Image (tube, rainbow, N blue to C red):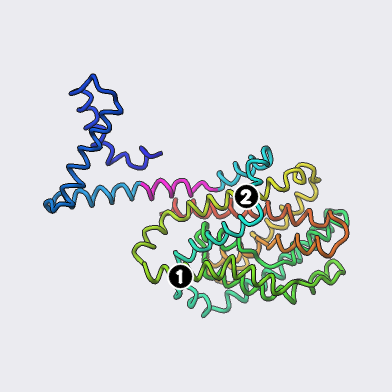
Amino acid sequence: PLYFVTHGPLNMIRLELNRSLRRHPQRSKIACRVQVTRFLHRRWITRVASGGNSDESHKLADLHRSVWQHVVIFFDRLTQVFPLWVGLGAAAGVARPAMFLWFQAGWIPIALAMITLGMGLSLTLEDFVEAARNSRQVTIGAAAQYLIMPSLGFFISRFLALPEAYRVGICIVASCPGGAASNLVCFLGRANVALSVLMTLTTTCMSILVTPLLLKLLAGHIVPVNAVGLLLSLVQVVVAPLALGLILNRLFPETVEKLSKIFPFFSVVGVVLICSSIVASHASTILSTSAKLLIALLLLHGGGFFIGYWVGQILGLGKISARTISIEVGMQNSGLGAALATAHFVDPLTAVPCALSATLHSLMGSLLAGVWRWRDSTNK
């Protein structure tokens, strides 16, 4: 991969290495490489640093620019196929859970916070001001979140005649707000990240009242939501890292602009670790789960992605905003659902759909973002 990234500048290094080997056949290849490295250091770095002519300075600048362009292209190509990495990581998580179980507990919030920081580096305050001005999009997204998913959860669970515990678990998932992972998928899928963050904040604040009412209506059980804990978690994972990224973008715009071109790849690494660890922690549950429950969750999240996208398109919000609404509707805060199911329902099977939901919507959202990213690159 290093040669692939820097094959242009390395042509000269290879030429000098071959010359050195011909001149000194008795030397080892490693010794000749050391000599070539010293030669290049004297020819470019030392001469330019000591006040070399402008041609040498331009050559060095062109070399650095060429290397960086190849690095950006290399990381972008790896990012284009990130659904493949997510899929491979999920398969490894099922086959060898011990590989990813270490990435649990405090690591997932840290990874999400670092990814959100990277998103903040690619945004400006003006992006949020523009998204906030168009409150119609936020309103449509929040309404779609709490109308589409609960309706799908209610009808799908009854149409497939699921057991009572699984039916209640699906209703819990469907009644939850959007999660922080949706912001990341919007970032990778080149949707409107600022709108996504505002929608997540809005639906999370609404969930304090709306989620208990929906669960009373769908499952016949009043479930209180820990408002303080939920909002505090959102501030730690989304608001604070995002604000730090915005500040760094304002203070160091040139450096941030350069680094933001490769940061999506490191976000992909974080997504792979998060998804793989979630799969690994529920590997036994996934292998023993009935096909009906998997089909129900696939229909739930797939329907949320599909209907959410076309709601945005039909209402004239444009392709980018439609993508954002699709991701926000299709991806739920399954962690909140699992916590509610564990704390307020006696049957432990009630939490199983929530755990599987976290795995499936992460994989499906990553695949969808990868398709959109690939289509955009192909169109360009």
Give the image location of residue 376, x and y in percent. Answer: 46, 55
Give the image location of residue 115, x and y in percent. Answer: 53, 59
Q: From the image, tell me which residue sits under label 1.
A: 246
Q: Earlier in the sequence, mark 2 or mark 1?
A: 2
Farthest top residue? 26
Q: From the image, tell me which residue sits under label 2.
A: 103
Q: Nearer the viewer, residue 44 or 206?
A: 44
Secondary element at image label 2: loop
Q: Residue at x 57, y 74 (%)?
A: 137
Q: Is residue 364 magenta?
A: no
Q: CA distance from mark 2 to mark 1?
A: 28 Å
Residue 129 horizontal side relative to residue 333, left or right = left
Asked if 259 appears above or below 212 in the picture, the reply is above
* CA neighbours of label 2 inside 10 A, class few (<14), some (14 to 19), many (20+): some
Q: Residue at x 69, y 70 (%)?
A: 229
The picture quadrant where one finds residue 313 is bottom right
Asked if 240 appears above or below 40 in the picture, the reply is below
The amino acid pointed to by label 1 is Leu
Give the image location of residue 240, x and y in percent. Answer: 54, 70
The magenta-colored residue range is 71-82
Q: Nearer the viewer, residue 185 or 296?
A: 185
Secondary element at image label 1: helix
Residue 294 horizontal side relative to residue 40, left or right = right
Asked if 363 appears above or below 171 in the picture, the reply is above
State which quarter of the image contains the N terminus: top left
The picture quadrant where one finds residue 157 is bottom right
Front tag of 2 and 1: 2
* CA neighbours of label 1 inside 10 A, class few (<14), some (14 to 19), many (20+): many
